[in-house]
Image: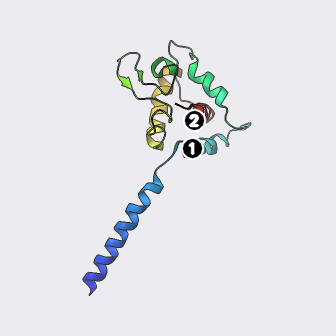
C-alpha cells in the first residue's frame, strides 16, 4: 500500500512538472518586460522606443559594424557573420519564433554582440529599444 502511494505521488509530481514546463517558456514580450523592469531603475527612464531601436540597429557605433552588418537591413532575413561568413538565422521574432525566448541566451547574445559592435555592454534602455523595434517588424 505504501509503495502504491509513493508511486502515485511520484507519478503526480512528474505529470505536474511536465505540465508546468510550457508555462516557464519565455516570450519576446516577457523578455521585454524584464528589460523594462531593469531600465525603470534608471533615473529618467520613460519607456522604450522602437524608433530609437531602429536607429540603434542600423547605425555604426564607432567602428565598422552595425547590427545590420551581420543581420541585414531586414531582420526577418537570414544574415551572415561579417568575419566568418557563418549563416545567422533571422533576428526578428516574426522571422524566427525561437528568438528572444530564453533570457539566458538573450543576455549571452547581447553581451557578445554589444561588445563586438559597441565595444561595451548594452544598457537596459538600448536592449529594450532594440527589442521594441524588432517586435514591430512583420515578415
Res. 90 image quadrant = top left
Scheme of image coloration: rainbow
Q: Secondary structure at mark 1?
A: helix
Q: Residues within 10 Å of mark 2 (few under 14, many from 20)?
A: some
* 49 sits to left or right of 96: right
Taking the spot 46% from the left edge, 39% from the top edge, the residue there is 97
Q: Which residue is mark 1?
A: 29
Q: Residue furthest bottom?
A: 1
Q: Is residue 7 above or below residue 80?
A: below
Sequence order check: which comes first, mark 2 or mark 1?
1
Q: Secondary structure at mark 2?
A: helix
Q: Position of residue 99 (x, y in %)?
A: 46, 37
* 96 sits to left or right of 128: left
Q: Which residue is mark 2?
A: 135
* 13 sits to left or right of 102: left
Q: Residue furthest front?
A: 139
Taking the spot 49% from the left edge, 25% from the top edge, the residue there is 115
Taking the spot 36% from the left edge, 72% from the top edge, the residue there is 12
Q: Is residue 98 above or below residue 8?
A: above
Q: Residue furthest top?
A: 64
Q: Are marks 2 and 1 in contact (CB under 8 Å)?
A: yes
Res. 39 image quadrant = top right
Q: Position of residue 132 (x, y in %)?
A: 61, 34
Q: Is residue 16 above or below residue 137?
A: below
Q: Residues within 10 Å of mark 1 (few under 14, many from 20)?
A: some
Amino acid at each position: 500500500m505504501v509503495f502504491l502511494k509513493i508511486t502515485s505521488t511520484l507519478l503526480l509530481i512528474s505529470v505536474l512538472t511536465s505540465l508546468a514546463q510550457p508555462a516557464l517558456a519565455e516570450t519576446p514580450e516577457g523578455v521585454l518586460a524584464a528589460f523594462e523592469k531593469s531600465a525603470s531603475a534608471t533615473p529618467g527612464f520613460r519607456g522604450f522606443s522602437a524608433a530609437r531601436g531602429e536607429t540603434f540597429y542600423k547605425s555604426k557605433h564607432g567602428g565598422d559594424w552595425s547590427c545590420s552588418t551581420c543581420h541585414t537591413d531586414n531582420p526577418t532575413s537570414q544574415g551572415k557573420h561579417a568575419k566568418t561568413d557563418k549563416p545567422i538565422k533571422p533576428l526578428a521574432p516574426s522571422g524566427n519564433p525561437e528568438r528572444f525566448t530564453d533570457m539566458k541566451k538573450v543576455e549571452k547574445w547581447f553581451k557578445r554582440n554589444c561588445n563586438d559592435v559597441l565595444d561595451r555592454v548594452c544598457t537596459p534602455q538600448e536592449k529594450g529599444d532594440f527589442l521594441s523595434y524588432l517586435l514591430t517588424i512583420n515578415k
